[in-house]
């Protein structure tokens, strides 16, 4: 059997679907036809686009296991690519410190990590809040570059990220272009910025410039 999606996580999903399909009496040919036509769902390793050799992938991984498995899948599908994991702690799971250690362990699989501010922090009791400073320290302890950039504006204006986006990394860093893996980013503002980056032909450095270019791009 073949599936068009990547990663061990999708192999396990396909295996479960295969067993159920056989139980209901479908033939192997029918099952394979289903696999061939299923392209996945939105925000699960969804390729939003590519520009200048840079691939932007959107994913709603909102717990350490999902982040780890999707980063492993990207490493298998795109060997040698420098993956930036851009992580916005917005879900109930990631805003809390229940997986403080596990999040660091998962994000270390990326080449570089950006963590945004914890969303709606006032809704989480202080003793339960994710500690971004500790998260950064734990990631860096493994030799991985990590940046705490609280807002979407700060993320898209970050000098290192801008340099890679502008030069595609091929000359500046001696390798293939980077890949931006955006996880748990339910923020409409940040998602709009990635859209403008892809559709507008380059990076935008502020909310105002993104909005202006989005209007011209989308008509």
Image (spheres, rainbow, N blue to C red):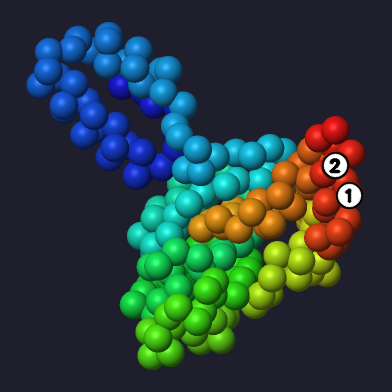
What residue occupies the far bottom of the structure in this picture?
127
What residue occupies the far front of the structure in this picture?
123
Q: Report x, y in % for residue 184.
A: 51, 58
Q: How many marks?
A: 2
Estimate how packed mark 2 is, as few (under 14), some (14 to 19) or many (20 or more) residues with alpha carbons within 10 Å. few
Local SS, label 2: helix
Vertical position of residue 188 compared to residue 129: above or below: above
Q: Which residue is mark 2?
A: 215
Q: Report x, y in % for residue 45.
A: 51, 43
Q: Report x, y in % for residue 42.
A: 50, 38
Q: Is residue 80 visible?
A: no
Local SS, label 1: helix
**Decide: marks 1, 2 in contact (CB < 8 A)?**
yes
The residue depicted at 36 percent of the width and 38 percent of the height is 10
For the C terminus, which image quadrant? top right
The residue depicted at 16 percent of the width and 26 percent of the height is 20
Residue 163 is left or right of residue 84, and the answer is right
Q: Is residue 109 visible?
A: yes
For the N terminus, which image quadrant? top left
Q: Quadrant of residue 103?
A: bottom left
Front residue (pair 158, 91) = 91
Estimate how packed mark 1 is, as few (under 14), some (14 to 19) or many (20 or more) residues with alpha carbons within 10 Å. few
Residue 105 is left or right of residue 11, and the answer is right
Check residue 176 in the rendering and tell me which mark sits there, or answer none: none
The residue depicted at 29 percent of the width and 32 percent of the height is 14
Q: Which residue is mark 1?
A: 212
Q: Report x, y in % for residue 30.
A: 27, 10
Q: Quadrant of residue 157?
A: bottom right
Vertical position of residue 191 compared to residue 199: above or below: below
Front residue (pair 195, 140) = 195
Q: CA distance from mark 1 to mark 2?
A: 5 Å
The residue depicted at 88 percent of the width and 56 percent of the height is 209
């Amino acid at each position: 059997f073949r599936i068009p999606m990547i990663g061990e996580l999708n192999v396990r999903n396909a295996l479960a679907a295969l067993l159920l399909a056989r139980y209901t009496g479908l033939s192997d040919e029918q099952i394979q036809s289903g696999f061939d036509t299923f392209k996945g769902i939105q925000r699960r390793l969804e390729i939003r686009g590519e520009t200048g050799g840079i691939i932007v992938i959107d994913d709603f991984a909102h717990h350490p296991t999902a982040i780890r498995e999707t980063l492993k899948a990207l490493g298998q599908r795109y060997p040698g690519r420098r993956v930036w994991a851009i992580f916005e702690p917005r879900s109930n799971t990631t805003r809390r410190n229940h997986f403080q250690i596990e999040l660091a362990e998962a994000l270390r699989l990326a080449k570089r990590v950006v963590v945004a501010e914890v969303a709606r922090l006032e809704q989480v009791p202080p003793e339960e809040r994710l500690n971004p400073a500790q998260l950064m320290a734990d990631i860096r302890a493994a030799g991985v570059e990590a940046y705490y950039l609280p807002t979407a504006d700060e993320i898209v204006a970050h000098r290192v990220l801008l340099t890679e986006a502008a030069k595609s990394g091929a000359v500046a860093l001696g390798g293939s272009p980077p890949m931006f893996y955006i996880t748990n980013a339910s923020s409409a503002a940040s998602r709009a910025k990635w859209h403008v980056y892809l559709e507008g032909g380059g990076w935008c450095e502020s909310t105002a410039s993104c909005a202006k270019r989005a209007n011209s791009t989308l008509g």
